[in-house]
Image (cartoon, helix red, strand yellow):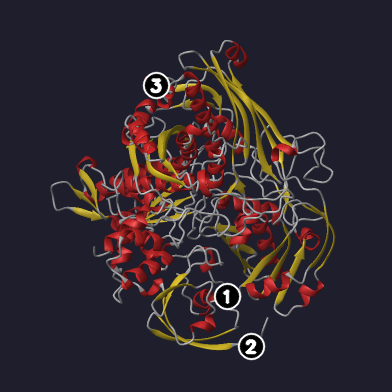
């Protein structure tokens, strides 16, 4: 007896208000007496600040407050954002300031905040602040940053090395000594920008009567934001509420707590009035965190049969100018590299370099696309050397289904062993190849070559760590109105989290999703929460919702049995009532809740008060999703244009709670991956000055770039790690796409012996490769 | 900066509206701030993403690039005006829900208004032109397949 709402395509709860223009994003929140903030940002990648004169800005009519670091810091109990995830690999501490003082270290770093009657006036005032900058040498490149004698990104820093760790197991040197074939490549993936269509933003609303502060923030991590605001403003938890309105996409950067959030909240407290700040797109380009610049120098050892013996090498990761999250992206990249395959010996040294660029934190994929790119490019190279089909070399090395669960020698960043819990990687790749007609491709390719057309095909496999623990909070309550209230620390940003939770709760409690109210991402309704990142919310919050709902269900049946004088075994919850099966007898959920709410002097049904359960189901190990992507491309010999003629994607995220939403997540990730492979280039000049700061210069995928022929298939290998058998899916699509496309382009250009070791691949790169330019 | 306010009379979703704005105020700001129609979203404020698309005398415009004073005498339509007076979703809105054409939904109003203009101009638009037209707006969540399917489903061809 279930509600029939889980594991199927029910209508999304989120859709009606979004479609009617009645949703509430952070910029839609209007507080009475609200003021507007703008930030003065550094125009230099690296400069000393000699003096700041804000007097003219302060004198502008309509300006209410101008704060530099010198003005703001006396009001703060903490002037730096201490957000770094712990790691023994740190080599220096780089906690960023709320506002820069003395030195700016990237273009876009906030130097002052202006609060005015409206945003127009605030921006007028920005131009009236005079800052005396003394430009310093900038560090624009992560490899050069670590060279001897390189200028330092921070004045007075001993060097530009912020993190240094080696991840490894087995004896790679012995493996290489005995190898039949060794291939070595230098590979890189490029820094990009997340570009949620809604930029960041917050509204800070002080309540001077109760000395409290409500912050509406477009954040992925409201509970972290509250903790940070308490630390920085010297407030108690009960004084600060952080709540997320509708969030217009996140993709990673909104999981970070930012200087702007601290400065706006502080300004609102100082003024005693609400203050709103909405990031504009240019600010998103220079102040929201970015990701992916990594340079890998790696080699792969194979035996004569094409079996992996070992991997070793070095990777340099661009950390940006501050530690805005940790060494997690570098760690995630190096951890992801070997995961899909049996790799007996492995050693990668990863060094994170400080540069004078926007700080780096996870963007959809979080290092995993880079690790997969490195592994897959090396496998292609080895296949070439051994004369093996690229699919065949992978087939020989994928972790086979009969080895599951497969305990790898790797450890997570928290020190727990990485165990691949379930999946059939060879089957997954086989189905992707079949969808792509891999075996028929050589005929298609040859036929096209006769016509002077260049087709290519490529394949890539990935394994993704999902469901980052240790928990997510969910409470489920039945109230006397008969309505079911669900509260969670999970923070939706477009993944249908409310629908997902309502599905699971309704599944246990009558099947009427319209009777379920979900409060997500609100510190006032959930005492604990970690939030949205790492493809975790369906796994972690979904599991807590499932377990809490079963407890509530048991309690509902217990009370109903008392009221109906029936056995619990004869009861069923249907819609908004509990009935005795096969009879007309029933009692409504409202009546059950009222009975459980108690009457003075009367016994409670079941001897307990209320109908509620709260869960923080703890699941430490991550559950590993996997997939395979095959890209087929046509390269235009004249223009260098790369058209993706066919893209076949098989993935396995365990049981699909809502197949259509799962497919939507995969598709969105694929689009992001194509952008990373072909279009998205965040340019900086040699002084780390960004040169792509609008969406006309930085190319996002549009409808015309999306391949018409996309085929997505699903395997379902339920994980044993949670009772629902589900794995995360939010980041899966992006991970293998760049690797598969690079492989396909290289295949198309095989007559030119081209090597595609870097993404994005632009048309001019293709033309250069065809002209035999050895630069690539 | 200017203290001079300009009176702008227009119709918004078939209702008369009069506002007083600075010359530099964008139509998007006027709709959102002066008229409370927050369904029109700003995504880039430089005319590329199309999130702020509204219809001005039937044609799709970027409300971030149109000054409010330019809307004097114009008929403006926004996402709030799409559903029937009784609240029934327009078939295009329903198609977006049916085809999972939205995830976070931030770009959705702009796509709906863009597609409305396409439907009104040529309800039998060919596939290639439909895709080309829809490529004028950006979405980061969906990969566009759902949006294309939704608009395709209401085209009469």
Q: Is residue B82 above or below residue A437?
A: below
Q: Tell me which chain the residue with mark 3 is part of.
A: A
Q: CA distance from mark 1 to mark 2?
A: 24 Å
Tag 1 subunit: A
Nearest to the eye among marks 3 and 1: give it.
3
Q: Residue at x 54, y 84 (%)?
A: B69
Name the spot of residue A669 as percent of width and height, x first: 45, 45
Residue topped by disc 3: A400
* Residue A94 appears in the rendering: yes
* Left/right of residue A3 with respect to residue A141 in the rendered view: left
Residue positioned 63% across, 35% down in the render: A295
Q: Are marks 1 and 2 in contact (CB under 8 Å)?
A: no
Q: Which residue is mark 2?
A: B4
**Which quadrant does the N terminus of chain A fall into?**
top left
Is the residue marked by circle 1 packed among few (<14), some (14-19), or many (20+) residues within 10 Å? few
Q: Which residue matches tag 1?
A: A32
Q: Chain of mark 2?
A: B
Frontmost of labels 1 and 2 is: 2
Q: Position of residue A519 (x, y in %)?
A: 45, 56
Q: Residue pushed farthest right? A: A50
Distance from disc 3 to disc 1, alpha carbons, whole Å, reads: 61 Å
Q: Residues within 10 Å of mark 2 (few under 14, many from 20)?
A: few
Q: Secondary structure at mark 3?
A: loop
């Amino acid at each position: 007896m279930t509600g029939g709402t889980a594991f199927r395509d029910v209508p999304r709860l989120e859709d009606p208000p979004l479609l009617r223009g009645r949703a509430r994003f952070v910029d839609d929140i209007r507080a009475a007496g609200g003021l507007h903030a703008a930030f003065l940002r550094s125009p230099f990648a690296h400069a000393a600040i000699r003096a700041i004169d804000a007097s003219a800005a302060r004198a502008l009519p309509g300006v209410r407050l101008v704060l530099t670091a010198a003005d703001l810091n006396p009001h703060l109990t903490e002037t730096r954002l201490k957000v770094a995830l712990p790691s023994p690999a740190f080599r220096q501490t780089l906690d960023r300031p709320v506002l820069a003082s003395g030195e700016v270290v990237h273009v876009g770093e906030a130097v002052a905040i202006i609060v005015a009657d409206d945003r127009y006036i605030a921006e007028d005032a920005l131009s009236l602040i005079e800052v005396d900058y003394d430009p310093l040498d900038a560090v624009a490149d992560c490899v050069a940053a670590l060279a001897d004698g390189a200028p330092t990104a921070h004045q007075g820093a001993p060097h530009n090395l912020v993190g240094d760790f080696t991840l490894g197991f087995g004896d790679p040197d012995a493996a290489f000594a005995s190898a039949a074939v060794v291939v070595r490549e230098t590979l890189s993936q490029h820094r990009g920008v997340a570009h949620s269509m809604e930029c960041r933003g917050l509204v800070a609303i002080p309540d001077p009567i109760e000395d409290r502060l409500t912050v509406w923030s477009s954040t992925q991590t409201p509970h972290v934001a509250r903790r940070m605001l308490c630390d920085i403003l010297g407030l108690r938890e009960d004084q600060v509420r952080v709540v997320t309105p509708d969030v217009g996409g996140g993709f990673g950067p909104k999981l970070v707590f930012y200087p702007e959030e601290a400065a706006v909240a502080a300004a609102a407290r100082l003024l005693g009035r609400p203050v709103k700040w909405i990031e504009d797109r240019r600010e998103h380009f220079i102040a929201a965190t970015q990701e992916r610049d990594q340079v890998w120098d790696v080699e792969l050892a194979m035996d004569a049969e094409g079996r992996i013996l070992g991997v070793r090498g070095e990777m340099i990761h661009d950390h940006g100018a501050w530690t805005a999250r940790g060494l997690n992206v570098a760690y995630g990249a190096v951890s992801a590299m070997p995961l899909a395959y049996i790799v007996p010996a492995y050693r990668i040294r990863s060094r994170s370099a400080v540069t004078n660029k926007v700080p780096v934190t996870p963007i959809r994929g979080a290092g995993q696309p880079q690790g997969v790119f490195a592994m897959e490019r090396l496998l292609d190279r080895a296949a070439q050397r051994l004369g093996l089909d690229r699919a065949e070399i992978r087939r020989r090395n994928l972790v086979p289904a009969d080895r599951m669960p497969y305990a790898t020698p790797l450890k997570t960043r928290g020190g727990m062993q990485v165990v691949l819990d379930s999946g059939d990687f060879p089957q997954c790749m086989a189905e992707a190849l079949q969808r792509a007609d891999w075996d028929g491709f050589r005929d298609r390719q040859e036929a096209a070559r006769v016509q002077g057309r260049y087709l290519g095909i490529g394949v890539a496999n990935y394994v993704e760590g999902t469901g980052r623990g240790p928990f997510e909070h969910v409470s489920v309550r039945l109230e006397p109105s008969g309505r079911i209230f669900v509260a969670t620390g999970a923070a939706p940003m477009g993944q249908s989290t409310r629908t997902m939770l309502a599905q699971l709760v309704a599944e246990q409690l009558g099947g009427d999703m319209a009777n379920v109210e979900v409060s997500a991402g609100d510190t006032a309704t959930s005492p604990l929460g970690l939030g949205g990142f790492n493809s975790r919310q369906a796994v972690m919050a979904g599991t807590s919702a499932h377990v809490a709902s079963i407890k509530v269900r048991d309690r509902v049946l217990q009370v109903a049995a008392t009221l109906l004088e029936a056995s619990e075994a004869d009861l069923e919850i249907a819609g908004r009532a509990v009935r005795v099966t096969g009879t007309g007898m029933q009692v409504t959920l409202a009546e059950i809740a009222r009975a459980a709410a108690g009457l003075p002097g009367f016994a409670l049904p079941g001897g307990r008060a209320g109908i509620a359960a709260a869960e923080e189901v703890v699941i430490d190990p991550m559950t590993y999703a996997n997939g395979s992507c095959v890209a087929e491309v046509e390269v235009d010999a004249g223009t260098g244009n790369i058209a993706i003629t066919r893209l076949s994607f098989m993935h396995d995220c365990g049981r699909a709670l809502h197949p259509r939403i799962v497919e939507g997540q995969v598709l969105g990730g694929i689009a992001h991956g194509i952008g990373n492979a072909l279009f998205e280039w965040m340019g900086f000049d040699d002084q780390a000055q960004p040169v792509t700061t609008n969406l006309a210069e930085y190319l996002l995928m549009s409808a015309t770039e999306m391949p018409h022929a996309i085929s997505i298939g699903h395997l379902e290998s339920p994980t044993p790690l949670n009772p629902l058998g589900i794995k995360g899916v939010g980041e899966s699509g992006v991970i293998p796409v760049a690797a598969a496309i690079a492989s396909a382009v290289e295949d198309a250009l095989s007559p030119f012996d081209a090597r595609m070791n870097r993404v994005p691949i632009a048309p001019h790169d293709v033309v250069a490769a065809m002209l035999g330019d050895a630069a690539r | 900066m200017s203290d001079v306010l300009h009176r702008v009379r227009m119709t918004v979703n078939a209702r008369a509206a009069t506002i007083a704005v600075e010359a530099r105020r964008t139509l998007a700001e006027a709709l959102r701030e002066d008229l409370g129609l927050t369904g029109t979203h700003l995504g880039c404020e430089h005319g590329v993403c199309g999130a702020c698309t509204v219809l001005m005398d039937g044609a799709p415009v970027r409300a971030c690039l149109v000054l409010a004073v330019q809307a004097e005498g114009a008929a403006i339509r926004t996402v709030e005006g799409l559903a029937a007076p009784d609240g029934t979703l327009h078939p295009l809105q329903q198609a977006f829900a049916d085809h999972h054409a939205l995830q976070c939904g931030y770009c959705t109003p702009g796509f709906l208004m863009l597609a409305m203009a396409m439907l009104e101009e040529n309800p039998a638009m060919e596939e290639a032109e439909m895709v080309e037209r829809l490529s004028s707006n950006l979405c980061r969540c969906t990969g566009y397949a759902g949006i294309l399917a939704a608009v395709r489903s209401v085209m009469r061809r």
